[in-house]
Image (cartoon, grey):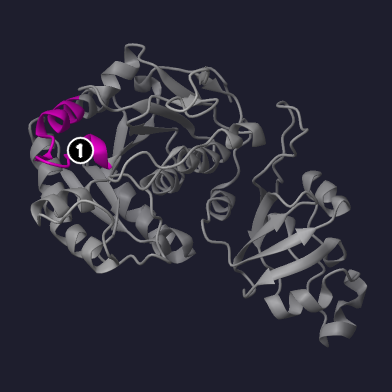
Amino acid sequence: MTKTRKPLQKYRRVVIKIGSALLVDRATGLKKAWLDAMCADIAALRARGVDVLVVSSGAIALGRTVLKLPPGALKLEESQAAAAVGQIALARAWSESLSADAIVAGQVLLTLGDTEERRRYLNARATINQLLKLGAVPIINENDTVATTEIRYGDNDRLAARVATMVGADLLVLLSDIDGLYTAPPHLDPNARFLDVIAEITPEIEAMAGGAASELSRGGMRTKIDAGKIATTAGCAMIIASGKPNHPLAAIEDGARSSWFAPSGSPVTARKTWIAGQLLPAGTLSIDAGAEEALRSGKSLLPAGVREVKGTFSRGDTIAILGASGREIARGLAGYDADEARQIAGKKSAEIAAILGYAGRAAMVHRDDLVMTGKRADEKDGRRDEVHA
């Protein structure tokens, strides 16, 4: 797969994430002129044969304006109430603006469980794909009316990446109040250097991420890099660009500053894409250097290489695998419940039957259920770290 950037209209399917501050003014509410210009850009892409999906923030920000809630942090029940009011206003705004170009909008509200649980993930994918097949533009957001602090995305950057991988998009565009990735937060470091092309998300790139930028936004550069890891692993390119000007997509096409993240040259399968994109692993396995090398060469994770088991998980749950450095290097589906995993950790596979009382699987995580998600800090850019089935 090419590492060369190409025009938006050359992509087949594009997911566009729009931050709250772009859509909603804290004092006056919806920025209708901006939204109308955005919808004109979407219509122009569709006219060139590009499928377009929108992940739109703004429900809580719009709802709190309608309800005249005071500035500052909201209680959970206040956020949920604001979302309930804001979702209606937001959906209506998108529908009206897109209808100017005879485009039908379809609202899709997702919870974390809709993408973390395999069956619900497939159901959501089928619904979104059917909307696209019928010529509608899906307008997607987290269902903040029922989401809780503990069980939620909390930002639409990662939600957009999950949606992009779910529908097989080849480009994810994150529009916010920053025009791309810098080596350091530019408002804090005048010597921060702008990065226009990121060939691969390395530990050094991850270290450049900062925090959230405004009260209207729950995301920041950290969540955008997380989104990039999810998207690029699945073979989807990503762009971070400023959404402040009217017609932001046209601005990108005209050469406005933005950061482009190259897609993986060896994207994982659809099933492994789902595993890699899990946001809430049920537990972790810490492994030794020998086991890490085995995983990087395409082998399964055997109990002998596991040094520590944390969390409460069942067989089939997604777990994170930490390398010898303590950094996450992979994710996979557990071959054993957590209690059994603790009993056989560090043991040879031949000892499993004697320890557990039955002949279990030889692997703690089988290579068919495992995908590499991180590189060693000293790995060169050219080396692939995916585990193939």
The question of residue 51 being in magenta is answered with no
Question: Which of the two residues, 137 or 130, is positioned nearer the viewer here?
Answer: 137
Measuring from the top left, give residue 20's x and y in whole percent: 26, 42
Image height of 137 relative to 46, above or below = below
Magenta highlight range: 20-40
In the drawing, does residue 5 fall left or right of residue 35? right
Residue 26 in percent (x, y) is at 17, 42
**Does residue 16 sit above or below 85 in this rendering?**
above
Residue type at mark 1 is Leu
Q: Residue 157, image x and y in percent?
A: 40, 43
- Corner quadrant of residue 63: bottom left
Residue sitting at the far top = 254
Residue at which label 1 appears: 23
User: Which residue occupies the foreground of this view, 387 or 319?
Assistant: 319
Q: Main secondary structure of the magenta part?
A: helix
Can you see residue 363?
no
Q: Is residue 242 left or right of residue 92?
A: right
Among all residues in the image, which is located at the extreme bottom?
357
Q: Position of residue 294 (x, y in %)?
A: 84, 50
Q: Is residue 296 above or below residue 181?
A: below
- Judge whether residue 224 can be spotted in this image: yes
State the quadrant of the N terminus. top right
Give the structural element (helix, strand or loop) at label 1: helix
What residue is rendered at 10% in x and 47% in y?
A: 92
Is 8 placed left or right of 261 in the picture?
Answer: left
Residue 257 sits in quarter: top left
Crowdedness of circle 1 by 10 Å Cα count: few (<14), some, many (20+)? many
Seen at 88% across and 51% down, the residue is 290
175 sits to left or right of 345: left
